[in-house]
Structures are given as C-alpha cells and as structure tokens.
C-alpha cells in the first residue's frame, strides 16, 4: 500500500480540525436537522425534474444566504459589478434561480434546475464559467462573441467550460446577448 506523506504544518492543521465523535442520538439528530435546514435549497434543487419539484421563481430581490455571504466577501467595486451581472441574469427569464455554495466560493445561476453559470470572484472583477451550449467556440480556442472575450480549454474537465472574465470595462450589452444565447440553448436542451 502506498504511503502518503504530508508536511508537519498540514498535520498540525488536520489535528486542529479533528474532533472526537461523542454525540448522543439527541445531539446527532439535532445537528443533522440543523444541517438539513441550512441546506434545504441545495437538497431541493439537486434533482428537481426527477422529484417533480417546481423551481422557485426568483425576482431581482436582494441576495439571501449563502449568496449574501458571497456578496459580502466582494470588494465594493466588484460587488457593484456582481449586482449588474446578477441583474442581467435574472432578466433572462422567470425560470432563473440564483444561489451560492455555502462555502461562499462561488455563486451560481440555474434555469429549470440546470446550472447555467458559475460566478467566481477575482481581485478586480469576476470570472464566469458558462455552459458552452449556444456558443460557437471550439475547445482549445479563444474568440470574441458579442464584443466579449471567451475562451475554452482544450481538455475541459467539467461542463461549465466557457470562461469569460468580467471587469468594469466589459461590454454588459454584449454579455447580456451572450448569456441569452447560453440561456436559450440550455433551456431548450432539456434533460
């Protein structure tokens, strides 16, 4: 069996995170219930079509946790940019849902339960990882669509592999047109 070696720093961090499991059934069930309550939207949106759950309609309302935590971690200029991009996304249709992962690493936009865009923060802007449906960008190329620069890696490892870097200089009308193309293709794709 191979041996995995870790640094002393990593070992110390792991030791700090390790806690013995000394829960009673009451505390375990309480924690499990709290966990499920906090992540209820994730469980409901996991497989909406199979479970027959209708997606919740989202209007252009203020973000809710964990999206609010994601937004709180943005600098003021990037937060303003995020709100502009979010408004663009929500304006695409009544079936758009906006959320974020609890770790606050990224926000996501879905249509009919299918994730459309992942929004990651950068120091001076945002990076959008889009589903390439509706975009005519070949793998391993970079191009300009609707006056917005898009790139796709040659060997993508996940479905959101069209990358757009958004800054204050990005043409938001062009971005709206590009997002419309992705939205229409993803919505019409089904399954």
Image (cartoon, grey):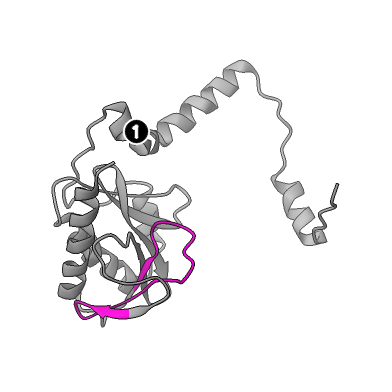
Q: Nearer the viewer, residue 67 or 174?
A: 174
**What residue is shown at x 20% (from left), y 78% (from top)?**
171
Q: Position of residue 140 (x, y in %)?
A: 42, 75
In the displayed orientation, state which residue is furthest to the front: 138
Give the residues drawn in magenta, as a range.
143-164
- Density class for disc 1 (Cα within 10 Å; few <14, some 14-19, many ≥20) is some
* Magenta span contains residue 109: no
Name which quarter of the figure residue 107 lies in. Answer: bottom left
In the image, what residue occupies the spot 22% across and 32% down? 54
User: Residue 78 placed where, x, y %?
Assistant: 33, 71
User: Which SS class for mark 1?
Assistant: helix
- Residue 148 forms part of the magenta stretch: yes
- At a point 21% along the width and 81% down the height, the residue shown is 147
Decide which of 175, 88 is in the foreground and name it: 175
- 124 vs 114: above or below: below
User: 122 or 165, which is in the foreground?
Assistant: 165
Q: Does residue 143 appear to the left or right of 57 in the view shown?
A: right
* Residue 86 found in image quarter: bottom left
- List the single residue furthest toward the top: 25
Residue 30: x %, y % from top left: 52, 23
Q: Is residue 65 above or below residue 79?
A: above
């Amino acid at each position: 069996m191979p041996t995995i070696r870790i640094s002393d720093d990593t070992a110390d961090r792991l030791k700090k995170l390790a806690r013995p499991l000394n829960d009673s059934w009451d505390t375990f069930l309480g924690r499990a219930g709290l966990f499920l309550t906090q992540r209820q939207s994730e469980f409901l949106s996991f497989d909406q079509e199979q479970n027959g759950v209708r997606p919740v309609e989202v209007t252009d309302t203020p973000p809710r946790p964990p999206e609010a935590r994601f937004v709180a971690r943005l600098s003021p200029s990037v937060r303003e940019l995020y709100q502009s991009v979010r408004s663009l996304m929500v304006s695409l249709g009544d079936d758009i849902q906006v959320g974020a992962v609890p770790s606050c690493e990224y926000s996501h936009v879905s249509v009919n339960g299918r994730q459309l865009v992942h929004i990651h923060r950068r120091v001076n802007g945002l990076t959008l990882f889009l589903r390439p449906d509706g975009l005519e960008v070949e793998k391993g190329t970079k191009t300009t669509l609707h006056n917005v620069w898009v790139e796709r890696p040659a060997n993508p490892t996940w479905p959101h592999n069209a990358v757009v870097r958004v800054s204050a200089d990005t043409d938001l009308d062009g971005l709206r047109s590009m997002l419309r193309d992705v939205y229409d293709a993803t919505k019409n794709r089904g399954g």
